[in-house]
Amino acid sequence: MTLLDISDYTLDLPDGTRLLDGVSLTVAVGETVGLVGESGSGKSLTARSVLGMQPRGATTGGSVRLDGREVLGAPAGDLLAVRRSSAGMVFQDPRAGINPMRTIGDHLTETLRLVDGRSKSDAEARAVELLRAVRLPRPEDHLRQYPHELSGGMLQRVMIAGALTSSPRLLICDEPTTALDVTTQAEIISVLGEQRATRGMGMLFITHDLNLAASICDRVYVMNAGRVEEEGDARRVFRNPQAAYTRRLVAATPTIASIGPLGPVVIGEATDAASAPRSVVELPRAVDAEAPMLDVRSIAKTYHLHGKPPVRAVVDASIEIPLGSALAVVGESGSGKSTLARMIVGLESADTGEILVDGVVRTAMPRRRAERLAHSRSVQMVFQDPYLSLDPRISAGRAIEDTLRLHSTLTSRDARTRVLDLLEQVGLGERHATAVPRTLSGGQRQRVAIARALAVEPDVLVMDEATSALDVSVQAQVLDLVAGIRRERGLTVLFISHDLAVVRRVCEQTVVMRSGEIVERGATATLLERPRHPYTRLLLDSVPRPDWDLDALAAIDRTEGVPA
Amino acid sequence: MTATPTLALEVLRAPRVHRADAAFVVSLGVVALMTLAAVFAPWIAPYDPDQVDLSAVYSGPTAAHWLGTDALGRDLLSRMIFGARTALLGPLIVVVSSTILGILLGLLAGWRGGWIDAVLGRVFDVVFAFPALLIAIMAVALFGKGLVAPVIAMSIAYAPFVARLTRSLVTSERSRPYVSAYRVQGFSGGWIATRRVLPNVTPIVGAQSTLNFGYVLAELAALSFLGLGVQAPTADWGAMINEAQAGLLGGHFLPAIVPAVAVVIVVVAVNVIGEEVSDRIGGGIPA
């Protein structure tokens, strides 16, 4: 039986921009349907339309029928009824969707009391039931807690419980796990799957992550630029994409290729050579195995906050990267991987330990001019969010030129030639030199950031989650760019990431961090195929893949006691 | 095909936008007119503002004197036009100098943080505790009557408003990744603060400062009204209201009302412009 039926749905803005162009999709009762696409593809817009949340002033066409009732153009009262009883929604950022001044109990019982007219005690009993259903450990206590007392993953469960209060027939999930760590994602997904099965709901699952969609969905729709490019059985689309766009998307999506006893899952590598893991980087120079380019010797950092127990961000961490090699530091949020990076580039000081770059001690935060310049010539960094790491007022060319002229005595003409040279190396042109960040795309901005980091010709390049804010196709381009630069210059790279699949594509060596400690290290391929530490194994098992066993994973969760 | 009822919303929304724009345009006109009057006063004014004509005392509006004359037979319109000069110049100097002073102090407090921030914060609190007018009166008491001492005093009195805003903007700016990126490239803290962070916060702070113009104008007029600011016989709106008080009892309203209304109109106009400008530039940070 069809629960949601969107047919030939179009949406135009008042200025004539067509955002959705003839979208058709269906969700049956009890079915999980994935809506996959990159940013700006219209996937969220489509899903929100089901609840009547179109942008102001938009003109719509076609039809969106939920449970047999037309939603488009429905009066406000009917839309409220749809939101009350037919469909619920879970959003990406749980913290943005909850009032920070009110308790979890207030949040959950409000609808029950006001809409269903239940008494306070009755509503609380029901809320406890719902919190137990989403597997929160202490439902009664959570009712009296405030949102800031819960972690992101716990809060997302509260939001799911909130969406379930009205016992909806359709649950719309808009990137519900994108902001969460991979182990937390696995828990949330398993809760969602369990609720869908026991309640017989239909689920519309929006994600940019093809691996995730293939793991949990029955069918997927792939969207691009407001159109549905391809639809079909989730695994079929993933393994054997038909549309050109889907093929590109699958090729650009990094995978862990082969994991444990499940055997290799080779995906899309034949279609695009660029997607093959670049585990071997040919170096122009011979690697000097004796003296590592970056040598971090048991550094530690503890933060002392007022009125709170000290936070041990990094505990006795040691890493070595040979010249021209790439090392990945993998870990979840709060594992201390970013603190490690910030200490290496001199943004934070280490409490104990030593950092050597090319044999020179670079432990202290640089103070005097000569120290600053020397430190920055030895280590450069590319930051996570290219939207924030470029000065909004300064053009791309100017940003690079400023750095060049700080470090050399180039005339302005020579500097400009060098700027164009650098922009060309990262695949940008002369017209990008005068562009301010606002007018550049995310990928272009990250290229500018890379060019700026390369301007001083550093010994070591630190990339802190440098591709995690980018769409997969853009991420693939940036990763290829970095691989190319490494081949040409023999650059030494420290690659910080939460994404094991990306790491596999970039780095020869990997260390795994957890709560400030390095728990496992080794060659990337070996580590991914034969993890020794249970935490590494948990991380790997949490990565979505088509034959994902969520029940087994849930069992691991409880036995290993993953930190919240 | 389903058309959503959004056209009606568009129509409802449209007039509001136009009203805001109309108020803004009218206000710009008022301030432009006043500025022209101030700059070209000697050429526009029909009479010498200080020319006494005892044969035409309290003439009321006539063909020769459009707004009438005051107790000494001086042409009211000419005095209004010349009065625009002090009315604009005083606030202009106060706003510019308090903005410069406030931005520098705010940048210092926000960028350096620590004890500098704490000390400056307490100093701002102390200055906030005294009304600007009171500080100006104290300055007059110390340094004598006239425009110079109150203008300097009010520049200091208004600086903390600017400094607080600057400080909060700089503090949030300092924690942004682009500042870390500059540090990693080897730029000094001083360079980043003055050459990169300062230009990024200045438009917002500057737009907010324009809102002070109206308050300063009213307060300086009040000072002149109290006889502590601009001194007779110089034409000044506040002083004119003061001088015209005696005439009110005799039924001669115009010499007092005209400058009073002018002050109100200009203050409102300046505030409308200031709010619109800070909305457009500052993204609606409340004053």
Image (cartoon, helix red, strand yellow):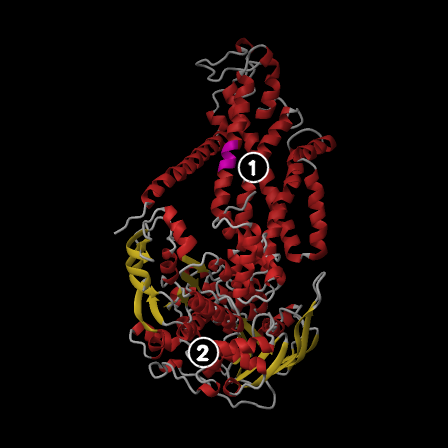
Residue A138: image quadrant is bottom right
The chain letter under disc 2 is A
Closer to the camera in the image, B287 or A101:
A101
Q: Amino acid at mark 1?
A: Phe
Which residue was labeled with disc 1? B213
Residue B55 in view, yes or no: yes
At 65% from the left and 53% from the top, the residue drawn is B108
**Where residue A400 sits: x, y (%)?**
49, 67
How far apart are the two marked residues, 1 and 2, measured between alpha carbons?
Answer: 66 Å
Residue at image location 54% in from the left, 27% down from the top: B263
Closer-to-camera residue (A50/B256): A50
- Was residue B234 drawn as part of the magenta stretch in this picture? no
Q: Which mark is residue A548?
A: 2
Please report the bounds of the magenta region as a residue range.
Answer: B268-272
Determine crowd level at label 1: few under 14, some 14-19, many 20+ residues with C-alpha closer than 10 A.
Answer: many
Above or below, A259 against B110 in this view is: below
Q: Residues within 10 Å of mark 2 (few under 14, many from 20)?
A: some
Q: Secondary structure at mark 1?
A: helix
